[in-house]
Structures are given as structure tokens and as C-alpha cells.
Amino acid sequence: MEIISATEAILDLTADQSLQAIGEKIIAGERINEEEGLQLFEKGTLSFVGALANLVRERRHGDIVYFNRNFHIEPTNVCVFSCKFCSYSRLYAHKEEGWEMSMEQMLNIVKGYDGKPVTEVHIVGGVHPKMNLDFFADLLRKIKAHRPGLHIKGFTAVELDYMFRKAKMTIDEGMKYLHEAGLDSLPGGGAEIFHPEIRKQICEDKVDADGWLAIHEAAHKLGMHSNATLLYGHIEKYWHRIDHMKRLRDLQDRTGGFNTFIPLKFRNHDNEMSHVPEISVVEDMKMYAVSRLFMDNFPHLKAYWPMLGRQNAQLTLSFGVNDIDGTIDDSTKIYSMAGSEEQNPAMSTEELVALIKQVKRTAVERDTLYNVVKDYSTTDFDKAVDVSLN
């Protein structure tokens, strides 16, 4: 009986010779170009791109799926910008419809986690003209004074661009100032779609692609890490996605500072793009699979479960994903307000571990920089091996 290798079986999933050639490159560990990435989107079946993505994922990470214990602070949803896809923000002119948290309120959120094994606070919100660079630098210092070991991941490039311009600081000066105040890393938000053709239609008034990339590059130069995102499934075409990912891949080649790539699904609830239908779960999985194949220099690919829903996030683990974010603890409203699957986004550690184990993966708790905190490979949750030195 003829024995067919796993890689041959993957190539047999398509009869298209050009796709088979792309598959051979990926299997050989070679980088694919923009045209080849576009072909995977346009011509590749979900079974083909998914099998390739799973192969790449398992070569890099085995059966490990990462998560972390984090909580969010969203200082305000009042914003000077008017992104058409956003269901979260309220224009500053209509700020009575939004919320604005005081310094004391935000510090009380941090103190509410005293004695709990969280490793990260994620700070992101609207762009409020009164919450300036000095205000947030003061917040960072006070958080670090209260809990020095808590990793602060904060502020999208959109927020930072506004802060720096208002403070009349260069990007390098502003990043250094916040880093010294206690900012440890940057989230990936605000990237949306880099191409100006789409950006002009959905978020014309905020920082452009070059500005977003420059802020992340400045952070990387300071030794800080960051994440990157892409908002997909609205008015963009496949080639816009490839263009976006290519710009990120190029910056990663230069700096190596990105930890994770996070595709974010457009949700059409209660925003100016509600007429645009949401794409299917099949298209979601293809987005994750092609991301894993094209973003070859990004170590991790994350599915943000509050946006996709628990079951769909679980499904992505067969399409290249090796991280499903954190426990969240019902502390973010960004996606629930947009009509995501999870209206109360909180999952206990036990629930996350069970979700991962159901698909025969090994759950590993990490910190923000992917250092292992706890390995849950044992069957009994209560007997999980704690490898933390804390």
C-alpha cells in the first residue's frame, strides 16, 4: 500500500498547480510574496489554506495555545475622531452620551485586583482632549507605584499620535517619556486597514499608516514590544489585506518588535457602516489561515475571543491560531457595543483551559511577553504545574 505523507496529503487538497507550488514553498519554509498571498485568498479552499496554516502553527508551537490573565481599563469612550465602523466612541461634541473616568476611578480598578494573579492591565479608549500626555503619564506612574510588577500595555497609535501632537513632542520624545513613566508595551489597535483608499472612507481623520508604523517602530527602538491588528470583513478587498500585512511584515523584518498579529472582525451593530453585511465564519477562518501563512516573521497569531465568540475562537485553533487572548474579566466594552458574540466578555481560567483542551491542545498561561507563567498540560486543573518564579 502506498503511504502518503502529511505534506503530500495537504497538496492533494487542491488540483490548482499554482496553489500547489505555493504550498510547496510554505512546506519548505520559504516566504511567499504578495501575489501568492492574494492567490491563497482568492483561489485557495478553506481546507487547503487551513491545513497549511495548521502545519505551520504546529511546527512553531506544537499543540500549545497561550492565554493570559489580564484586565482592561477603558478611560473614556468620548473621542475627537469619528470612525465610521466604530460602535464604541461618542464624539466629544456629544460627550454626555459617553463616560469619562477619573484618575481615582482607574486606580481603584487596579486596586480591585490586589492579591489576584493577573499579569497585565490593558489601557485603551477614545481620544479625549482633556486626557493628555501628562495625565496618562501620571496614571502610569501611580499604577507602577502601587503594583510595580504589573505589565502595562496601553494606548493605540491613534491615542499616542494625538497626545504627542498636542504636547508638541516628536514621536521618539513622546514614546521615551511614556516608557520612562511606566508604559511597557503597545496594543495593536488603530491600524484598521492601512491603504489610503479604504482609510479615507472609514477613518479619514485619524493617524495614517505611516504614522501608525512610525509609532510602533519608535517603541521597538526603545526595546518595547507591541502587537499589530487588521480590521477585516467590511469594504476592503483581499489585496488591501495583503498590502496591510506586507507593511507590517516589512517593519517586523527591520525591528523584530511585534509579538502578535490579531485579525479583528468588523461588526456592524450600531455604527455608520451598519448597512455592510458581516462576513461568514468560513471567511473568518480563511483570514486567520492566510495570516499565519503570510506573516511568517510574527511569532504569534491571536484570535480575540470576545469579538469572535468562544466557539469560533476555538475553531481558529485549527487554522493557524496559537493564542486566544486572556480572561478579560468583563472589563471591555469595545466589542460588546459593536454586537459581538460575547455581550458579557468574561471567562475564568478554568473555562479558558477547558475550551483549549476540548480541541486537544495544551493550555499555557503566559505573560504579555510570552514567558510561561503556568502549564496546564496535566489533566487535573488543580494540579497544574506552576512554573512562575513569582
Image (spheres, rainbow, N blue to C red):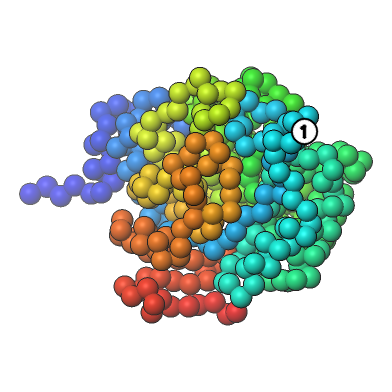
Residue pointed to by mark 1? 92
Indicate left or right for 76 with 261 as reference.
right
Residue found at the very far left of the displayed protein:
1
- Residue 154 placed where, x, y %? 70, 52
Judge whether residue 239 can be spotted in this image: no
Which one is in front, 103 or 281? 103
Q: Amino acid at mark 1?
A: Tyr
Q: Is residue 21 left or right of residue 188?
A: left
On screen, 249 above or below 102?
above
- Vertical order, 348 against 245 (above or below): below
- At 42% from the left and 45% from the top, the residue drawn is 309
Rendered residue at 62%/37% (across/down):
88
Is residue 114 among the parts visible in the rendering?
yes
Q: Residue at x 32, y 43 (%)?
A: 51
Q: Characterize the local packing of mark 1: few (<14), some (14-19) or many (20 or more) Cα atoms within 10 angstroms.
A: some
Closest to the observer, 101 or 35: 101
Q: Quadrant of the C terminus?
A: bottom right
**x and y percentages locating residue 78 in the rendered image:** 73, 38
On the image, which quarter does residue 80 sit in?
Answer: top right
